[in-house]
Amino acid sequence: MYAQKFVRTLALPSAIGLATLLSACGGGGSGVGTGTLQVSLTDAPSCGFDQMNVTVSKVRVHQSASASDTDSGWHDISLSPARKINLLTLTNGILQDLGKTTLPAGHYTQVRLVLDTSGSTPNSVVPEGSSTEIPLVTPSGMQTGIKLINEFDVAANQQVDLVLDFDACKSIVSRGNGSFSLKPVISVIPTLVSGGISGYLPTGLTRPVVTAQQNGVVVKSTVPDATGAFNLSPLPASSTGYVVVITADGRTTAAITGVPVTTGTTTPVSTSSTPVSLAGSTMRTISGIANPVAAQATVRATQTYASGGPKVEVAFKQADLTTGAYSLSVPTAAPLLGKFGTLPIALTADSTIAGKYTLEASATGYTTQIFNADVGTADVTKDFTLAP
């Protein structure tokens, strides 16, 4: 599910035919003349941290997906000096401009985000409630860039805008000894074919998270601000829409299906006067060990609503890099379900799946393991042994 060598090969299902879409909007990829590439950085929420810092030195693009860092033909956006960015300030649609460059018109297939690894804490985290900045363990390959395979066209005399969506929550992995590793999970979204989803939650929720999902896979996530407002953007445009899933500690899960996203627009699912309300719920723990530890497995808990309803991810955890341990906190109360339409959207409890979850343990190069867990009356312990 996630790359093991800090290489992320990206293929966004909702952005199939990206090159065609960009060409239709003015990108011809003729190779004649020059165009402009603008790159920005955004983030999903980080789990259990007050800061998640990365120091960006450059962004590189190439027309060949197989080009090595020493090959000719690279075009760079260099940040001088390198810029240290707290990713947790980039939620709710906030973008950090990384710069722009002029490059030959044509078809490009590789993007690399290069992080600076010099100094004491160029890439670091500050745990929740702490004042201590802990350096992130980063692989040596980070100096040549996090490799992102993503195709886009640059047309003569036009600008292409790309957003690098750095998922902080999935990119930080515990090492079991108080230290953490950086295992980047990044998606590339062209703003030319994107829109967003907005709404409000009640204020005062504990650790609320809002995600846009398709087929049980999280495409974008964020956290509401102090007023309860949230903004899931940029999101690839989708006529079939997204499932907006809302979770919070001590609350049941809510899902809104069929939320459309149109290029250049933001779709509201709730307002400040009628925020999405979540019923209270007891929380229980699903925990265990995922072996082999070297697999660097991810364990997630999903629910599938009755009568052909959607499959949604409720919680996930990357297993500890040293022990393989994982722990998920999930609600026992019946999850809520509503269909996008006239606001406010009515939510109905699905009692048939209250406290029932499907666990999926997965890792690159290993067969995914499935287990059905019922936390209705007690916590659940489940160990996984993954096989290649």
Image (cartoon, helix red, strand yellow):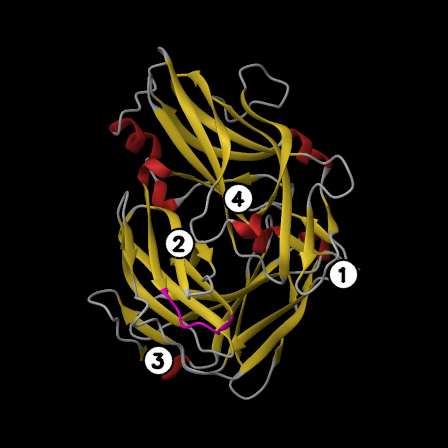
**Circle 4 — which element?**
strand
Say whether marks 1 and 2 touch (CB < 8 Å). no
N-term-proximal mark, 3 vs 4: 4
Q: Nearer the viewer, residue 268 or 64?
A: 268
Report, in whole angstroms, how far the alpha carbon at label 3 lies from the one at label 4: 33 Å
Question: On the image, numbered disc 4 is attached to which residue?
Answer: 186
Start and end of the magenta stretch? Answer: 200-206
N-term-proximal mark, 1 vs 3: 1
Question: On the image, numbered disc 3 is attached to which residue?
Answer: 350
Which mark is nearer the camera, 3 or 4? 4
Report, in whole angstroms, how far the alpha carbon at label 1 lies from the one at label 2: 32 Å
Give residue 232's mark: 2
Residue plotted at (34% across, 71% down): 275
Say whether marks 1 and 3 touch (CB < 8 Å). no
**Circle 1 — which element?**
loop
Q: Position of residue 4 (x, y in %)?
A: 64, 45
Question: On the image, numbered disc 1 is attached to which residue?
Answer: 176
The three-letter code of the residue at mark 3 reads Asp
The three-letter code of the residue at mark 4 reads Ile
Say whether marks 2 and 3 touch (CB < 8 Å). no
* Magenta stretch secondary structure, dominant: loop
Q: Position of residue 87 (x, y in %)?
A: 57, 48
Residue plotted at (69% across, 56% down): 126
How many other residues sit within 10 Å of disc 1, few (<14), some (14-19) or many (≥20)?
A: some
**Circle 3 — which element?**
loop
Image quadrant of residue 260?
bottom left
Which mark is nearer the camera, 2 or 3? 2
